[in-house]
Image: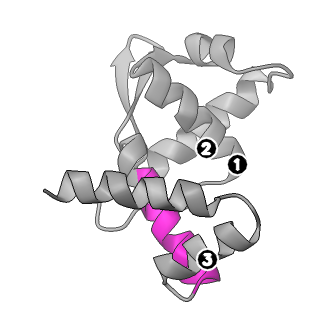
C-alpha cells in the first residue's frame, strides 16, 4: 500500500477493535465495541469497506470470515498525524508545539522535559 488512506470515524472504531484483537470474527468484533453497539449488518458493511480500502484482510472458514488488520496502528497514526500537521499547521511540527503551548495543552516545563528526553535518546 503506497499511501495510507483516511478512515471515517466508524471505520476507525472498527479498526481500533481489530488492532486490539489482531484477528476476529464478526461476533467477536461486535462484542468488543462499546455501547451503544451498531447493528451487526452495519459492522459487516464497515468491515467490507475496510477490506476494499485494504485496511483489513479476510480468511474464510466455511461461511465465517476471520478479519485481521493489514495496516498497523502505528502506520495509520503516523499518516494521520502527518496529514493533520500538513492540513492545519502548514506542515510544521514547530507550529503544532507552539499551538499546544498557547492552548495550555503543553506547559513550558513539559516542553523542557520532553527536550531533555529527546536529547537522551539522541545520544
Quarter holding the N terminus? bottom left
Asked if residue 108 shows in the view, the reply is yes
Please state which of the two labelled residues, at mark 1 or mark 3, is closer to the viewer.
3
Q: Which residue is mark 2?
A: 12
Reply yes or no: does residue 71 show up in magenta.
no
Marks 1 and 2, Cα distance to the nearest angstrom?
5 Å
For this view, does 92 lie left or right of residue 30? left
Q: Is residue 117 above or below residue 57?
A: below
In the image, 123 versus 54, the foreground residue is 123
Q: Secondary structure at mark 3?
A: helix
> Going 31% across and 57% down the picture, which residue do you hit?
118
Q: Is residue 6 above or below residue 57?
A: below
> Going 43% across and 63% down the picture, which residue do you hit?
79
> Going 48% across and 76% down the picture, which residue do you hit?
93
Label 2 crowd (10 A; few <14 / some 14-19 / many >=20)? some
Q: Which residues are magenta?
A: 76-89
Label 1 crowd (10 A; few <14 / some 14-19 / many >=20)? few
Q: Secondary structure at mark 2?
A: helix
Numbered badge on residue 98:
3
In the image, 112 versus 78, the foreground residue is 112
Q: Which residue is mark 1?
A: 9
Reply yes or no: does residue 78 show up in magenta.
yes
Counting from the top left corner in percent of width and height, residue 58 is at 38, 29
Amino acid at each position: 500500500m503506497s499511501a495510507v488512506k483516511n478512515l471515517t470515524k466508524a471505520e476507525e472504531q472498527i479498526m481500533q477493535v481489530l488492532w486490539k484483537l489482531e484477528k476476529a470474527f464478526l461476533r467477536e468484533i461486535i462484542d468488543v465495541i462499546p455501547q451503544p453497539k451498531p447493528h451487526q449488518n452495519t459492522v459487516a458493511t464497515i468491515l467490507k469497506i475496510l477490506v476494499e480500502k485494504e485496511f483489513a484482510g479476510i480468511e474464510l472458514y466455511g461461511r465465517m470470515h476471520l478479519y485481521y488488520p493489514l495496516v498497523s496502528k502505528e502506520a495509520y497514526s503516523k499518516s494521520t498525524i502527518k496529514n493533520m500537521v500538513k492540513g492545519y499547521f502548514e506542515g510544521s511540527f514547530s507550529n503544532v508545539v507552539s499551538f499546544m503551548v498557547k492552548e495550555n495543552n503543553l506547559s513550558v516545563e513539559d516542553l523542557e522535559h520532553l527536550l531533555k528526553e529527546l536529547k537522551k535518546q539522541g545520544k
